Image (cartoon, rainbow, N blue to C red):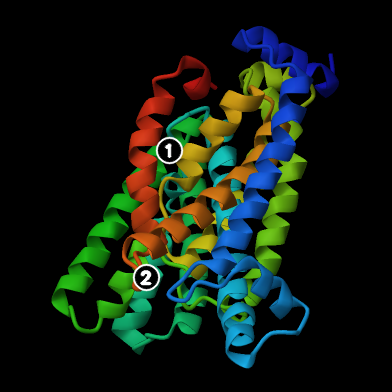
Amino acid sequence: MTLSDTAHGIKKADGQHVPTSRRLFFLPLALAGLALLVILSIAIGSKFIPVPQIFDALAGASDANTAHIIWDLRIPRTAVGLCVGMALGVAGALIQALTRNPLADPGILGVNAGASFFVALGVALFGVTTISGQVWLAFAGAFVVTVAVYFIGSAGRGGTDPAKLTLAGVALSAVLSGLVTAMTLLDPKAFNEMRYWNVGSIVDRGWDILLPVLPFLVIGLLLAVIAASSLNAIALGDDLAKSLGANVALTRVIVVLAVTLLAGGATAVAGPIGFIGLMIPHIARWIVGPDQRWILTYTMILAPSLILASDIVGRIVQWPGEYPVGLVTSFIGAPVLILLVRRRKASGL
């Protein structure tokens, strides 16, 4: 038996059979929805810009003020939303598949806690308060802490184990979160800017913030694609996965590295935005079944759609001001996730 038999084995073990026609039917609808949200993200804000004016600006035929709003503010912000959403969603799908835990998210490997801890150290020790400076601190923290969680979860008899990784991530995250809270309370004024970052926002995130991190996100997505087939095998259990020819240890290393790059980069750019990596894989799994290749495909479309939709809602409900996208995703994500996990097909792995 080879990896080509994995999809059949997953269907048999999971009890689900999702026809390819269903998967293909919803794909153009999801892409059309994402395209619509991109247009709305560019159009809606403190100043509404009609769609014809957007196309005029793209063609270089608009006034200077409209062109500035579109090219310098809203297009970069929309691009950040697309990249951050895609990264967080895929990272969540990978973690859920690796740990076989439908309630896992990128934070389970210490990504958010590591990023926040390093940013806090930068503020406390070096007075780093600019977004451009905090990006690299957050990325370094996410990487270092995630690697530490992996080594802690790999120590001892039996080597790497999903349960050990989960426990190590939760424990280290709790410790680091406590340290960050303590530092914040000791000097509230110095950490005022960080508290805003901790909410999760794509406001004022432009090309200067996104482009340096973008190569890491691309590498993370490529690693996710490479690991997808092996994750299908791992879903059947480690022993059966090995019999199917999957290199379980190598797959875990690839997935941990991919999650570090994706969730670490996204958190560095926009702060810790919750529920994207937790909720979107459930929706994708409900549509396409347990095949990780299809789950990752749909997650790459649906996750940025949710980020952009939340960002748009945040601009509308407090117009002409706005709520940070992290707050909106929490309000949207909590009740939707409760409904999803009550569905057996959506919550099962």
Lateral position of residue 107 relative to residue 209, left or right: left
Quadrant (top left/top right/bottom left/bottom right) for the N terminus: top right
Q: Which quadrant holds residue 285?
A: top right
Lateral position of residue 25 relative to residue 86, left or right: right
Q: Going 62% across and 26% down the picture, which residue do you hit?
A: 287
Q: Nearer the viewer, residue 313 or 14?
A: 313
Question: Circle 2 sits on which residue?
Answer: 197
The amino acid type, in three-letter code, at marker 1 is Thr
Mark toward the viewer: 2 or 1: 2
Where residue 295 appears, x then y in whole percent? 65, 33
The amino acid type, in three-letter code, at marker 2 is Trp
| SS at mark 2 in the image | helix
Where residue 85 appears, x then y in whole percent? 56, 54
Where residue 267 appears, x then y in whole percent? 48, 62
Quadrant (top left/top right/bottom left/bottom right) for the C terminus: top right
**Which numbered circle lies on residue 48?**
none
Mark 2 or mark 1, earlier in chain: 1
Q: Residues within 10 Å of mark 2 (few under 14, many from 20)?
A: many
Q: Going 40% across and 65% down the picture, which residue do you hit?
A: 315
Question: Circle 1 sits on which residue?
Answer: 166
Against 299, is 179 above or below? below
Q: Going 70% across and 21% down the picture, which residue do you hit?
A: 241
Q: Is residue 252 visible?
A: yes
Q: Which quadrant holds residue 19?
A: top right
